[in-house]
Structures are given as C-alpha cells and as structure tokens.
Amino acid sequence: MALNASTLDQLAQHLENCQLQAQDTLKITEAHPDMDWDDAYAIQDRILASKLSKGARIVGYKAGLTSHAKMKQMGVTDPVFGFLVDEYVVPEGGEVKVSELIHPKVEPEICFITRTELKGPGCHIGAVLAASDVVLPGIEVIDSRYRDFKFDLKSVIADNTSASRFIVGGRIAPARDVDLRTLGVVLEKNGEPVALGAGAAVLGHPAAAVAMLVNHLGRRGQSLPAGSLILSGGITEAVPVQAGDNVTLRIQDLGSVSVRFV
Ligand code: 0L1
Ligand code: MG
C-alpha cells in the first residue's frame, strides 16, 4: 500500500462527507497520485466501517463498469466493485430526493439474490446460477462524488463506485429459468425510451459479473453471504435525471420497476 492509515482514514471521511452533504470534490488521485488498488479498496472499506458503526446494515454488493457501453462512456477498461447498505434502498415506485444527491444518473440492471454462500477464487457462471435464488429488475442511481463524473478507476473504487440509491422490483424469476443473455431491456424516462439493451451487454452474461465479484471478494479473504443482493452492472450507458423525472425499467419476462425524482 502506498498511503498510510491516517491518510486512508482522512480520505474515507472526506468522501463519505461529500456523499452525506451532496458536495462534489476533485478526484482523490489528484492529491495522491501514488495511491494503489489496495489503498482504493481500503478507503472503500473504511467508508463501509463508518456506516456500520452508525447502525447501517449491509444488504449486498454491486459490480460497476461491466458493459462496453459504460466502459466507453467513462473511458476505462475494467469492472469495479462496491457495497450496498440499507440507506441506499428506495422502495419500488418510491421517490428519490434530488436535493440529497449531486448529479444523479440511472442505469438498468439485472439483480441477483443468492440462496447459498459463494466463495472464490474459481467462481464461474455455473456456480453463480446454481447458488442464485432469483433474478429481478433493478434501477441503480449512481452519483459520483467527483466533479462532473471526472475520475479514474482508483478514485471511483474509493468512492464506493458511485453507489447512492437503488430500486428493485418487477417480477421475480428463478435464475435458472431465464436466459439472462437475451433478455431485452428498455429504460424509459418520462414515458420515452432513452436506452435499450440486452443482458449480454454485461460481460457477455450478467452472472459473469457476479462471478468476478465473488473472485474479487475471495482475493480479499471474503465470501459472498447467502441472501446477498447483487446489482450486476449497468446494461446501457447511464442516463442523467433531475427533479420531476419518472423512470421506468422494463425487462423482458421480468416486468417493470419505477422510481420518481423529486
Ligand atoms: O454502477 C456503475 O457502473 C458505476 C460505476 C462507477 C462509475 C460511474 O460513476 O459511472
Ligand atoms: Mg451500476
């Protein structure tokens, strides 16, 4: 690791404060160009520890930057992983207060809920499907704490991969009963389709993103607990939203889920 413990603490507190106060900041590698990958995940770990110490509950994980559309949009080449806590949960059909966020965008995702624990290394699509209970549609609201969404991979990992809110719902289906690669996806804003895609946009198969997450956790001596919710990654580019917008995600065979921005 390149940064000392007190710098990691200070950066984690800074990024969490930016999230809680809806305040943007310059990407942290500007001031810490030597920061390495372990430092980036160590900062993310410290943000999680801070939230857990204040009573938050971890509800799952997310994979981000998993589609070529998103990687191209953000000018990066590798997926990233983050945590989900209960403060990010918005009920289906619920409201997201834009005043609590900096510059929100929405992404359509296929979500998994696991029935049994998954451990890496060596996790693969088959193991993910065997361990998954159900899949369902999810809208992820991302809100990078970095000014104008300008970041690099290390900065975005430290910032818990821009996690801010998510909404799951629609029709829950057994993971093994649907071909997740060919599921058609339509994201609508105010009744108009704004992004279209299919499950295969996520690394060829959304379960591949979950396997990568499990292998990432395995490298860090962790496993994915039974009952975890996983957002497997945006299927299309992310779409900016503002107060007054209504967003609906429709996924073939999995129904729809909606959220309002107020
Ligand atoms: O979930 C995502 O794909 C977001 C990853 C972080 C990058 C971003 O803010 O777009
Ligand atoms: Mg996402």
Image: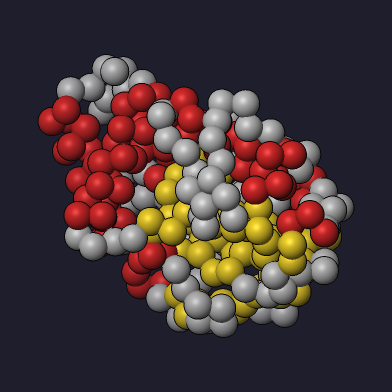
Which residue is rendered at x = 27% and y = 25% of the image? Answer: 32
Front one among 229 and 31:
229
Any part of residue 71 in sight: no
Quadrant housing residue 134: bottom right
Q: Is residue 242 above or below residue 107?
A: below
Image quadrant where residue 250 sits: bottom right
What count of labels does the image hold?
A: 0
Query: In screen coordinates, is 217 left or right of 114?
Result: left
- Image coordinates of residue 124 in percent, x first then y, are 69, 33
Q: Horizontal and vertical percent for residue 224?
A: 50, 44
The structure's colour scheme is secondary structure
- Image quadrant occupied by the N terminus: top left
Residue 190 horizontal/vertical position (percent): 66, 79
Q: In the figure, 225 relative to 34: above or below?
A: below
Who's the residue at 35% across and 72% down the image? 99
Residue 30 position by quadrant: top left
Q: Is residue 150 above or below residue 86?
A: above
Residue drawn at x 32%, y 22% as measured from the top left = 35
Please name the residue shown 38% across and 56% down the image.
58
Q: Nearer the viewer, residue 100 or 64?
A: 64
Outermost front residue = 116
Percent across and percent down for residue 139 are 59, 64
Q: Is residue 40 positioned above or below 167 on the image?
A: above
Can I make out residue 121 in this image?
Answer: yes
Horizontal side of 31 relative to 251 (left or right) equals: left
Q: Nearer the viewer, residue 191 or 91?
A: 91
Choose between 66 and 53: the one closer to the eye.
Answer: 53
- The residue sitting at the left extreme is 6
